[in-house]
Image: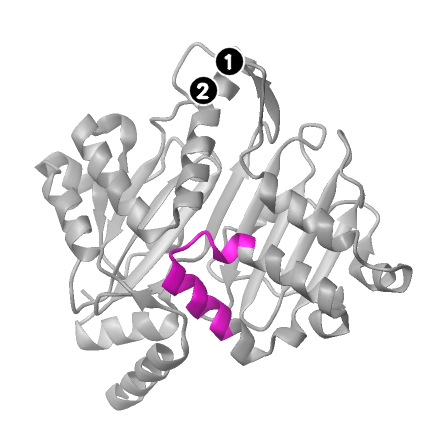
Amino acid sequence: MKSFNLFLLLAFITTSAFAQDAHADLARKFVNSLNQEQRAKAFYAFTSDERYTWNFVPKQDRKGIWLKDLTEEQKKIGFELLRHWISKKAFDQTEGIIGLENVLREIEKRDSDWPRSPGNYCFIFFGEPHDSQPWGWRFEGHHVSYNFSSYRNRIQSGLPSFMGTNPGKFERDGKTIEVLKEESVAGFRLVNALNAQQLKKAVITDTAIDHVAIWNSRKALSYEPKGIRFGELDKKQQQLFRELLNVYLSRYDGVYAKDLLKEIENAGIDKMLFAWGGHTKQEPGRVYFYRIDGPTMLIELENTQNNANHVHTIMRDKLHDFGGDALLEHYKTAHGGK
């Protein structure tokens, strides 16, 4: 049984998307900055079910060490760690999303830090940051969730991940703020490049689908294959498809993003589906939805709430969310499940 588990792990390491990862030292730096009480809140076992209880709604019982309970120096080190795992673009978007909590607090006329506050985001670790043993961590709060797994100084997984915005678009000091603008624009660019026959395949519903809230599951959901396949698009449309896909892959560092794309292509990018729901013209108050679905990756955007001004986006790795089952089985076997 042990040899079989080792075989699974080696196969996983050979075929999965991961990248060189030099973050263990940064993680230890953050961990070492915590006092005993903070460490007690921040640490869980790698085998803990808490590793899979991710969520992107405001939660008063969210586990981990909250930003509001960190010193300014600790916050700086923590964000340095996050910045190392994701791209600059994604980090800027994350900062923008956290900043929207202050906007919501104004809009909703709240006079307390709950539920709207930039301090209500958490770091949590699963196992001690280690150079040769599996460990993971999460950064999470309202409209943000990043779930990372590491083994032998390599990123085994950066998924599932979630980014959302409310409001999706607003005016502030004479400027238009739209944190997830590229995600919507690239989707509309592709759907509007399709001809009438292609639209019949791509548009799977006249109304936008609003069910991303059930996606904080242990594993990615499976759907009946619907939409238009990449292989049914012409070269220009395929390029637009790739540009939309890259909007999401580029949330991660260059090497990891390339490895994710390689895994998609090895499984057959021609098999990937693009599905649309709702309005195909981007206008105020008009809801819309799209899904990119393939053998390895599932991506979705919906804008259905607050008069179509509340965007949700999600990425799932069908094979290796949370590092995959093989990594967990290896940990249990090699480290006694501790």
Occupied quadrant, residue 328: bottom left
- Residue 41 lies in magenta, yes or no? no
Q: Residue at x 24, y 71 (%)?
A: 331
Image coordinates of residue 197 in percent, x first then y, are: 89, 64
- Type of amino acid at the residue the image marks with label 1: Glu
Q: Residues within 10 Å of mark 2 (few under 14, many from 20)?
A: some
| Residue on which disc 1 sits | 106
Count of residue discs = 2
Compared to residue 323, the image places residue 66 above or below, namely above
Does the image show residue 73?
yes
Compared to residue 106, the image places residue 76 above or below, namely below
The kind of secondary structure element at disc 2 is helix
Q: Check if mark 1's residue and mark 2's residue have beta carbons within 8 Å.
A: yes
**Colour scheme of this structure image?**
one colour
Image coordinates of residue 187 in percent, x first then y, are: 68, 50
Compared to residue 208, the image places residue 73 above or below, namely above
What stretch of residues is rendered in magenta? 247-263
Q: Residue at x 44, y 45 (%)?
A: 90
Spatial separation of the CA atoms under disc 1 and disc 2: 6 Å
Instruction: Indicate the quadrant containing the C terminus: top left, top right, bottom left or bottom right.
Output: bottom left
Compared to residue 218, the image places residue 179 above or below, namely above
The kind of secondary structure element at disc 1 is helix
Q: Residues within 10 Å of mark 1 (few under 14, many from 20)?
A: few
Q: Is residue 40 left or right of residue 117?
A: left
- Residue 257 lies in magenta, yes or no? yes
Q: Is residue 90 left or right of residue 104?
A: left
- Type of amino acid at the residue the image marks with label 2: Asn
| Residue on which disc 2 sits | 102
Q: Residue at x 61, y 62 (%)?
A: 242
